Structures are given as structure tokens and as C-alpha cells.
Amino acid sequence: MAVIDPARQRPGAGPVATPVDVAQAARPARKRKASQFEGSRGFVSAQDWRNPRVSVVMKTLHTILLVLLLVVGIGPVLLLAKFAITPTQDIIRTPLAIFPHGVRWANISEAWNDVRISHYFLNTIWLAAGSWFVQLLVATTGGFVLSVLRPAWAKIVNGLVIATLFVPSVVLLVPLYLTILNPPGLGMSLINNFFAVWLPAGASAFNVVLVTRFFDGLPREVFEAARVDGASSFRLFWSVVLPMSKPILGVVSVFAAIASWKDFLWPMLVLKDPNLQPLSVRLPAIASQTDLGVFLAALAISTLIPVVFFLIFQRMFLSSAGLGGAVKG
């Protein structure tokens, strides 16, 4: 609505527009101009998209890129699934032919029962679950001490934790193995024991730094209010900090599960008993003495299981700002 200055009105003349009128009239024009250029921030502007030739070329390129992405991403998985139910002779002679001599479903049953994929899969689950728990315990308690409690020596410990990130893991392999071979004060070796994998997994400086940075972004007024209400350190950690930290707990859980599932070198060194080895260690060991079709069926089963787990728990991994807003700095 225009604002009219009565002092500037002349007798017999219409209302005179003030500078306020000019500013209000120019504002919608600026908005329209901004909205016109808003769609032109990409590689191809909105005006170019209206050109039939440009539109056809860009849609064709998008289709080609989508097909290439599907071939590169899903193609190997589909090929492995085909090999899992293909006779060995067909895999060797005509690998790309579509079942020239029929389907052999016995590969899957032999891989599950004779090769004992089910047993090695349970070992993998136990190792992943234990590593996840230890990593989560060390990361949350360490981050709570360094970020929330903040003792006098917190800065020194935080600097030492960050310094360990610059040490290559290969350098720590021999001293860590000697420690597991003869743990101080324990009097027994942890070789062929799941604790030999669980305990070193908890020494993850990256997780401690990640959780500490997240705890630094939490409102300290809540901690002070809990202290005033008489909450102990454990009650503050369990009832206040952890419920506010679900995003970062999801991120650490994903990292821990993936690292444990694909770990090969360390479980191979400390779990020498084949009955205790996970899939990542046992499958390469049986490759030379197993029928090719059965072995590929075992690989397909071991690949399918984490995919199914992700599909089941993807809402927990990706919702609630799980991977997007988990790290606060």
C-alpha cells in the first residue's frame, strides 16, 4: 500500500509518490529478477534447457551416465549372483553365457553346509558385535571425560590422542602382537581368543576425537543444570549426554561395523584356529581347495548378508541427521 505525504499534495492533482512508494514498487521487481536467475546457477541454465537441442543432449547424457553407474555398481553383484548358481564348467568355459547347461542350486547348499559358511558367519557376527561395543564404550567415555568433565590434564591427553593419528598402523603391528601374546598382569596368552580382536579395536583415536568434537557442540547449560540438580558423573553421562548423542553413536557404529567386517590381517594373526576365524580370513584360505562354483556361492552369501543388514537398519543409519549433522565443530 502506497504511503502518501499530505504535505506534498497539490490542489487538484493526484497523490504524489514518496521514496517509500518507489522502494516498495522496486522490491517485487528485484524479487522477480532474482527468481529468473535462480534456476541458472547450474552448468546449464534454465533458458538453455528450453532449447530443444540442448534438452535432448542433456537428457541423453543423463541416461548414459545412469546406465554406466548401474553397470559399474550393480553389474559385479549380479554377475556374482549368477556365478553362485552356475555349474563350474560353465563358469570356466562360457562365463558370460546365461545358464547354457541349467542352474545348479546345490552350490548354495554346499557352501552353507559343507564349506561351513554359517559357522564363519557367526564368528564374524561375534567379532563385529564385540568390536562395536568396545569401540563405542571407549569413544563415549573418553569423549565424555575430555569434553564434558574437562579435568586439568584433559588438554594434554587430547593432544596425545590426536598425535596417535599420525602413527601408521603397520608400525604398531609387532608391539601389539607381542602384547596380545603375553598381556601384562594377565598371565595367559590371548591368541585364539576373541578378546585379542575386541580389545585392540577399542583403541581407536579417530573415534575418540570424533565423539569429543561432537560433545563440544552440546549445550553446557544442560550439564550445569544437571549438576545443580545433584546428578553424579555417571548419571550425567547415562541420562543426559548419551540421549543427546544418538547421531554420533550411529556414525561410530557404522564405522565400527564396516571396519570389523572387512578386517583381514589382524584376525588372521591372532585367530589361528580355523574354527574361530571370520569370513574375511577363512574364505581366502579355502579358495584353493573348494570347487569354484561352490566358492563363488560362498562369496555371494558373504556379500549378501551385509547388504541385507544395511537394508534392514538403513533408517537407523541415515535418519535423524545420522550422517549429515553428526559432526559439530
Image (tube, rainbow, N blue to C red):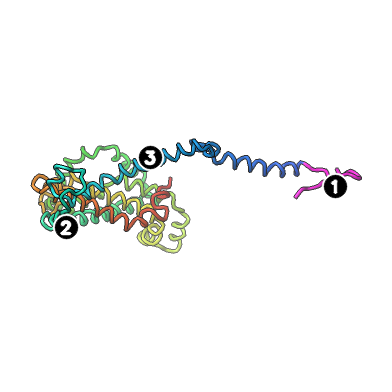
Main secondary structure found in the magenta portion: loop
Instruction: Give the residue number, with chain letter if any, for mark 3.
Output: 64
Q: Residues within 10 Å of mark 1 (few under 14, many from 20)?
A: few
Cα separation, mark 3 vs mark 1, equals: 67 Å
Q: Nearer the viewer, residue 187 or 30?
A: 30
- State the separation of the CA atoms marked 3 and 2: 40 Å
Q: What is the crowding at mark 3: few (fewer than 14 residues within 10 Å), some, or many (at least 20)? A: few
> Along the horizontal axis of the image, is 103 left or right of 232?
left
Residue kind at label 2, given as amino acid type: Ser
Q: In the image, what residue occupies the spot 24% across and 56% down? A: 129
Q: Based on the picture, tell me whether residue 5 belongs to the magenta stretch.
A: yes
Q: Amino acid at mark 1?
A: Pro
Which disc is residue 6 wearing? Answer: 1
Answer whether labels 3 and 1 touch (C-beta < 8 Å): no
Query: In this image, 15 relative to 193: left or right?
Result: right
Q: Nearer the viewer's eye, disc 3 or disc 1?
A: 3
CB atoms at circles 3 and 2 under 8 Å apart?
Answer: no
User: Pointer 2: what residue?
Assistant: 118
The x and y percentages for residue 181 are 12, 47
Answer left or right for 14 relative to 151.
right
Is residue 79 covered in magenta? no
The residues colored magenta run 1-18
Instruction: For mark 1, give the secondary structure.
Output: helix
Q: Secondary structure at mark 2?
A: helix
- For marks 1 and 2 on the same chain, the one whose residue lies earlier in the sequence: 1
Percent across and percent down for residue 235 are 37, 62
Depth check: give the residue in front, 15 or 65.
65
Labels 3 and 1: the sequence-earlier one? 1
Q: Amino acid at mark 3?
A: Ile
* 224 relative position to 82: left or right: right
